[in-house]
Amino acid sequence: MNRIAERRQRIPARWTVRPADPAEERLRSELGIGRLLAACLVERGLTDPGDAHRFLNPRLEDLHDPLRLPNCAEAVQVLLQAKERGERVFVHGDYDVDGITSTAIWTRSLRRLGFDVFPHVPHRIKHGYGVQEEAVFHAMKQGAKVLLTCDCGSSAHQAVGRAKQLGMKVIITDHHELGAQLPEADAFVNPHLEGHDYPFPHLSGAGVAFKVAQQVAVELGARAEQFQRAFLDLVCLGTIADVVPLVGENRIFAHFGLKLLPQSKKKGIRALLKVAEVQGEVRSYDVAWRLAPRINAAGRIDDAERALRLMLTEDEEEAQEIAKELNELNEARRAEEQRILEQALETLSEMDAESLPLLMVWAEEWHRGVVGIVAGRLCEQYNRPVFLASVDAEAGVAHGSARSPEVYDLHEALMQKRDLFLSCGGHARAAGFSASVEALEAVREELLAHAQSVLKPEDLVPTVRATAEITAEDVNHKSFIELEKLEPHGEANPRPLFLMRNVKFADFQPTSNPEHVRFQILAERPIFGIGFRSSHLFESLRPGDPVDLLVRASINRYNGNEYPQLLLEGLRRA
């Protein structure tokens, strides 16, 4: 049994069930839907039938007017003037999927409209996060008159100031949380800016780029629908990969983008689908776990510019070659991730980690492009904020990432303690930082003290909340097909989780991979399911033992046949 499985077995989560709500009956009556779907909608706060109908039936017409974004009109005006004067636009993105797709949206759309564009994404190791002064000088050498950021720039005070000194116009398009002081850009487009009425503040960086670039295209005579068809594939990738809430506009981007991905005309996307072995219908799972990791791999352990080239190339052979390279980089990333995870678990086991409200560890040999993934896995397992850092002993600097469950706001914590860091920023649940090696112990102590002041012991107990309790009668083709209307799943719209009490297995057997178990539940008609990486849960069980199950609904489709199937998420004796 691996260490993560051991921990799951040793410290079981607290199981709760969301109580039934009277609003469910109204939804069932007015929308003509089943009990399980109604329960899921209410759980998502969709108690009004009109809101629920719009959620289940996304429409491109429900996207908000881009001009409602703060300073969108000013950004468009700067770009139109640049086109009129024939001035070069330097597009500065970021090295993750959101930043790469944002850069691709801007570069492709502006070039199509006749702009002179020079795209750039930083190298994680050489340049670090965000817009640095080095990039500004690079833009100047390229003859750029406009510096346009996407998925970054909201905290780039020095770089923006330098660009202005050098005579450049600066447009920031970003979605990150804002500090007390804002860079003095010519146009600052960020849905988090106060004093504006944009209805949806949860856009990804690609989402913000998509909206503003669409308005530029419309001003130059294109139809909004034409722009959307051309770039929904890219904004879908960035939105799902950046784990922003898949509701509102993000749900619309994901819903229509996923439909367009298999038919994308972009050679890089087609090559990526092929190398990731994604065929036919593309789901949010495929983006999150098969496509995005390959795009991210370039920025994590090599150069993100390679992934950007994949998103921009018009050469079929080049696309296939880059996609193959990204696939190999992803395999190397996975190996490095596992190595860091094992070492981090070893260190945490020596720290009595379960007694601490916040975990922070670091080491010299860890790849700084991978520590964020490992921090996420440790956060999931320990249910508390985790800070991981890679130490550059020669430079005397540690670069790290942090991940946190919902009970702790990383951005707020970092802002309160920002004097301890050389740099820091991010979101409530994911953040990045750098600090001097000499300060790491002090950073850990200060963050630990802060966590102790805001987290209660019960916050650290993993709690799993099921959407509803179900019985064998609820496991049927009609109900499970209806639940697929909730897709695409992601942040703020997870696959629903259900509790089944006091059931008995007729049989259970390992698959060809002994970590996975197939099972059949005793019922009037056969009910089948599978538990991935769950063999440890069955070690002391016998068929016929009464158990409680946490399950997700799925439809098993094979050789033209369909039947409802349970996906096991948790098991305990009844």
Image (spheres, helix red, strand yellow):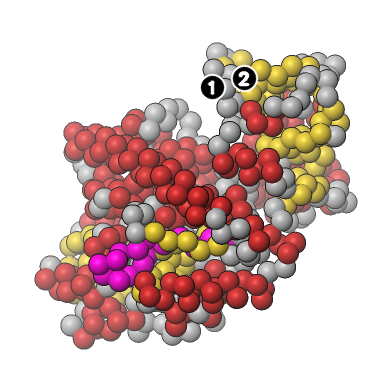
Left or right side of 69 for 32: right
**Picture layout, residue 371 above or below residue 216:** above
Look at the picture and state if 540 lies above or below 107. Answer: above
Closest to the observer, 275 or 37: 275
Say above or below: 97 vs 396.
Answer: above
Residue at numbered disc 2: 510
User: Badge 1, how many Cα within 10 Å: few under 14, some, many 20+?
Assistant: few
The residue depicted at 21 percent of the width and 35 percent of the height is 321
Q: Compare residues 299 and 331 and report the one nearer the observer.
A: 331
Asked if the stretch drawn in magenta spans residue 58, the answer is no
Who's the residue at 66% across and 76% down the image? 453
Q: Quarter of the image for the N terminus: give it.
A: top right
Magenta-colored span: 385-399
Q: Residue furthest front?
A: 350
> Horizontal and vertical percent for residue 325?
25, 38
Badge 1 is on which residue?
Answer: 513
> Position of 227 compared to 310: left or right?
right
Q: Residue at x 86, y 45 (%)?
A: 25
At label 1, which amino acid type do we have? Asn
Q: What's under tag 2, amino acid-wise?
A: Pro
